[in-house]
Image: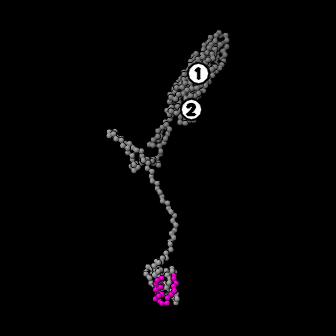
Amino acid sequence: MLERTVRAPVLTQHRWVVTAEASKLSVRLETSAGVLVKERDLKAPTAGAERARLAGAVLATWMMEQPAAVEPPVAVLPAVEPTLPVVTPAPIVRPAAPVVVSSVDAGIVAAVKPTPSTMTPPLVSAPPQDSPLPALTSGGASSADGPATSTKQRAGDGSTGEAMPWRWNLSAELRAHASGSMTGGLGVRLGGGTTFGGFLELNAVLPRTLAFGAGAITWNRFGAALGARYHPDWRRVLLEPAVSLEVAALWARASGFVRNEAQVTPDVAACAHLRAGIHLEAVTLFTGAKACWWPIQTNVQIGGVSGTLALPSFEASAVLGLGFDWVKGSSVPGLSGS
């Protein structure tokens, strides 16, 4: 077997093996680990010099071809999932409106537009977590340094400009009646409404006496009235005109005669009212007047006495009264916060 030494870079990777037999010359190219790369069988010359020259030619040809080195195995790396980059959006800067600066003396007007870098956002101070927020109340003022205060507004004061709520009123009147003679009376009224409303009224008058012949006639009326009233919104001032239709029972009794009898007859009247006063929260103090006209003339006649006695058909009264107001839906009289 014939071996030939080659240059160091090739020797480190390959080995050349030449085998000569009687009539055959075998040239092999192997790696340093003994792995066959190339092999060629030639007809061997008889002379040894010729065999060496033929093997050298084959080896030189292979050396010119620069045989490729055996590539090392490729390392397999574990798969790595791609990670998306986190993109932080840039802050949006809103340019402020141009600021116009004028100079009166120089007569120059310049427009200055601030750049985003020069704009400073306003600082907003948030209240501490443990500090109470200021309370808001209707019709009053609130303060963070102290308790909120509120004011009560009476129904129909008109300070807010809103429509008046439905209001109820219960009142009692003391009256001084003038009808043929002076006497006293009492009236009770229950009313309801807004600016316009209605009422129910009960009236009672003390008996009055008129002289007739040798005796006298004592008479009286007890009535109930339905009416309509107008209540303008003048804050605490009360000025309320009204009209009503009254139905009454007329009672008359004779005294001082041989035969004294009593008689009851129905009667009807048209009345006009006027109240003026002042509202004090839920209470109203007022004075006023009432006038009634009884269109059906009532005459009293006594047997054995000549003539008749005509009872007065017109009646005027002076009024002094006290009223209580409350708003619909409110349990507190006189308050409009409902």
Residue type marked 2: Trp
Q: Which residue is mark 1?
A: 271
Residue drawn at x 46%, y 77% is: 66
Q: Secondary structure at mark 1?
A: strand
The image shows a total of numbered marks equal to 2
Magenta-tinted stretch = 39-58
Residue closer to the observer: 10 or 200: 10
Image position, residue 144 (x, y; %): 45, 43
Residue closer to the observer: 12 or 197: 12
Q: How is the image coloured?
A: one colour
Residue closer to the observer: 317 or 56: 56
Image position, residue 278 (x, y; %): 51, 28
| CA distance separating discs 2 and 1 | 25 Å
Residue drawn at x 64%, y 21% is: 249
**Few, some or many C-alpha atoms within 10 Å of disc 2 (few <14, some 14-19, many ≥20)?**
some
Q: Give the residue furthest to the left.
A: 106
Image position, residue 69 (x, y; %): 48, 77
Is residue 300 visible in this depiction of the protein? yes
Q: Is residue 47 magenta?
A: yes
Q: Give the residue furthest to the top.
A: 306
* First reached walking from the N terminus: tag 2 or tag 1: 2
Image position, residue 193 (x, y; %): 57, 30
Q: In the drawing, does residue 295 fall left or right of residue 157?
A: right
Residue drawn at x 62%, y 24% is: 224
**Callout 2–callout 1 Cβ contact below 8 Å:** no
Residue type marked 1: Cys
Q: Secondary structure at mark 2?
A: loop
Q: Which residue is mark 2?
A: 166
Is residue 33 visible in this depiction of the protein? no
Residue 260 sits in which quadrant? top right
Relative to 228, is 15 above or below? Answer: below
**Few, some or many C-alpha atoms within 10 Å of disc 1 (few <14, some 14-19, many ≥20)?**
many
